[in-house]
Amino acid sequence: MSINERSKDQELERNRSDPTGQRMTTGQGVPVEDTDNSLRLGARGPALLEDFHLREKIMRFDHERIPERVVHARGSAAHGYFQVYESLAGYTKAKVFQDPSKKTPVFVRFSTVAGSRGSADTVRDVRGFAVKFYTEEGNWDLVGNNIPVFFIQDGIKFPDVVHAAKPEPHHEMPQAATAHDSFWDFVSLVPETAHMIMWTMSDRAIPRSFRMMEGFGVHTFRLVNAQGVSRFVKFHWKPVLGVHSLVWDESQKLAGKDPDFHRRDLWEAIEKGNFPEWELGLQIIEEKDADKLGIELLDATKLVPEELVPVRRVGKLVLNRNPTNFFAETEQVAFCTAHVVPGIDFTDDPLLQARNFSYLDTQLTRLGGPNFTEIPINRPIAPVHNYHQDGFHRQTIDAGRANYFPNSLGGGCPFMAAAEKGGYRHFPEKVAGEKVRQRAESFQDHFSQAGLFFRSMSKPEREHIILALQFELGKVEREEVRKRVVEQILAKIDAELVTEVARGLGMDVPTMTAVKGKLDKSPALSMENQKKDSIKTRRIGVLVGDGFDAADLQSTKAAIEKAGGDLMIISRRLGTVKGSDGQPVKVDKSALTTGSFEYDAVFVPGGAASVSVLKKDGDSVHFIQEAYRHCKAIGVTKEAAELLIAAGVSTPAPGVVVGEAGGQDFPAKFIAAIAQHRHWARHDKDVISG
Ligand code: HDE
């Protein structure tokens, strides 16, 4: 069968319903005369049981909720496609990787892990990055995260780590946060969490947007080619816009001012045609080389440094369409690690093995039975024929009498396909052993990569990890839990880390017992080493009052928009502000409804009248101060330099660009400063920690 980018969209069309120009009906299609008044005995009398419309309307409302996901409840998704750059037939027979001219439809859901469905987007947490490929030989789900490792090594510990991270059972607090006793108690007692803790305390756990984070398959999978040769593979998603994060103070403020910050960002980017893109990267490891790496590939608390095995970029993922209906698509989509296609196979990673059971199982409760695969967003484009039948909400109407195999009544159909004819054949891995509840010796190193990660960070990144730990452990009430984390976990990771965290918590610095691996640093792990050459889709807040210099705004706006940035006009009140040329300009946001944390940079045009108002306005002064403290680019022209003085910002300062808007170099310098994302040289710990 042949598919293209639109195949899934077209297939969903048969379930879409458009009410334009239509009569309202009951669920039975009977036209409704009045939906505002129930049928009563007399205008002031009791409601009548025979009012089928009242009963149906209330009954449908009463049952609108389904259980939220037990983890990853809060999420946002979009449609798009995947396209491979060149055939990977040498590595895998998966159809999705054969033909560079083919676009395979995908549905991608991003999520936080710990919070409920209505929790804020910008909390400190891992982000889910789940991709459903609707391939011509069935659905392949790559259910990943934005962090390449995990808290635990064996799926049997998953209920424990999730219980510990979620709100505590007696009072259900705190929401969407790990800054509480039970989580850190678990960490202190389970050293295999050490590496993941370094990532979740880093800025990776507070991404600037879904569009600017990496994705990882986490486990080692297998690619199998048509000759049956298997190689190990680690999957990576590399965002085209680079990897960027918020700072903790911003995350917390955003959680209050715009809890939908990431959801809105994704939705708006797609609506504006700024389609988010990632490149798929593969780390391929020959089976014979696996032992030489010295890294247990079946241990999901370990990564393979890119310096040891380079990431080869093999294709592109583009998200170009928002869902039509949140519930029908984003909420009802069901991912499962066991959804693989020929050419992609599992390894014996004990976390992956448990996931293969869990994702299938959890849908029974969440989506109400085994027919969830027939829900429009979940059903494959590939034809489905089997001997499954019945169950709640069955959609398919199976024809014929043969609901068993083998059969002669149905001519033996549906029939089995040999591997050569597309049938999925599991890789015939040789295994032998005794049944034991044990972990191999190779799973015992919990600290070397935690230290590798910490040492690979830039100075500001290390400071952020230290402050995050001080914050989280500072919220822990039991002193012995704090002590155990510091002494039993942090002391085994890195001297600077444990010294600074202990100091911040007012504790004695314990004796270091750090365990180092062979590799001292992996520069690829630091976000600071990612490319920073574009301001595409960056939001620049513009502070103005009446009388702002219209020419200043025009020239800067033109330059920024040309570079792909987006300007938002912020003023005291909604409506319009008048420029020096007497022309009104529409205000996008009133100072009351926004804050500097919603922008990547701030620009203040000149104009004496405008600047003298801004100088006296507490919100505007605070806007500048906050943008400065969060190390963002600030651009001011002419009289607007006075606003810097009012805000206590002394120049020159890194990332603060003062100049003539129409002048030769102002726009270019300002754009270069925005592209840097942050100017950590003005980094001040106490301020950043909020
Ligand atoms: Fe999940 N995880 N997980 N997980 N996970 C779920 O499945 C589970 C793990 C991930 O947008 C659940 O449909 C176990 C690692 C994402 O719908 C559940 C273990 C990674 C999503 C489940 C893990 C993930 C989930 C809840 C340890 C990164 C959201 C609802 C063995 C590679 C998918 C659902 C979406 C969701 C189980 C560990 C990623 C309960 C048992 C490691 C992105 O089945």
Image (cartoon, helix red, strand yellow):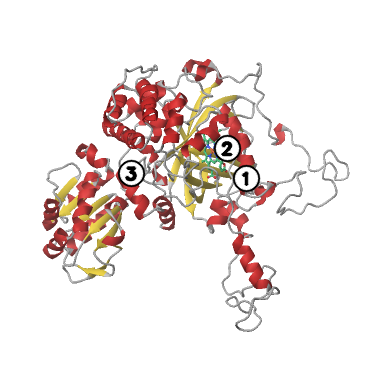
Residue 548: horizontal and vertical position, in percent? Answer: 17, 64
Q: Earlier in the sequence, mark 2 or mark 3?
A: 2
Q: Residue furthest right?
A: 409
Crowdedness near tag 1: few (<14), some (14–19) or many (≥20) residues, C-alpha within 10 Å: many
Q: Earlier in the sequence, mark 1 or mark 2?
A: 2
Name the amino acid, label 3.
Leu
Name the quadrant of the C terminus: top left
Q: Which residue is mark 1?
A: 363
- Tag of residue 98: 2
Name the residue rendered at 44%, 31% in the picture: 185
Residue 119: horizontal and vertical position, in percent? Answer: 44, 50
> Quadrant holding ligand 1?
top right
Q: Earlier in the sequence, mark 1 or mark 3?
A: 3
Q: Nearer the viewer, mark 1 or mark 2?
A: 1
Q: Nearer the viewer, mark 2 or mark 3?
A: 3
Name the amino acid, label 2.
Gln
The answer to which of 565 and 78 lies nearer the viewer is: 78
Q: Residue furthest bottom?
A: 42
Crowdedness near tag 3: few (<14), some (14–19) or many (≥20) residues, C-alpha within 10 Å: many
The answer to which of 576 and 261 lies nearer the viewer is: 261
152 to the left or right of 228: left
**Does mark 3 have its CB less than 8 Å from ligand 1?**
no
Is 554 located above or below residue 2 in the figure?
A: below
Residues under numbered marks 1 and 3 in contact, where contact means CB atoms less than 8 Å apart: no
436 to the left or right of 394: left
The answer to which of 173 and 54 lies nearer the viewer is: 173
Residue 622: horizontal and vertical position, in percent? Answer: 21, 53
- Tag of residue 246: 3
Name the amino acid, label 1.
Gln
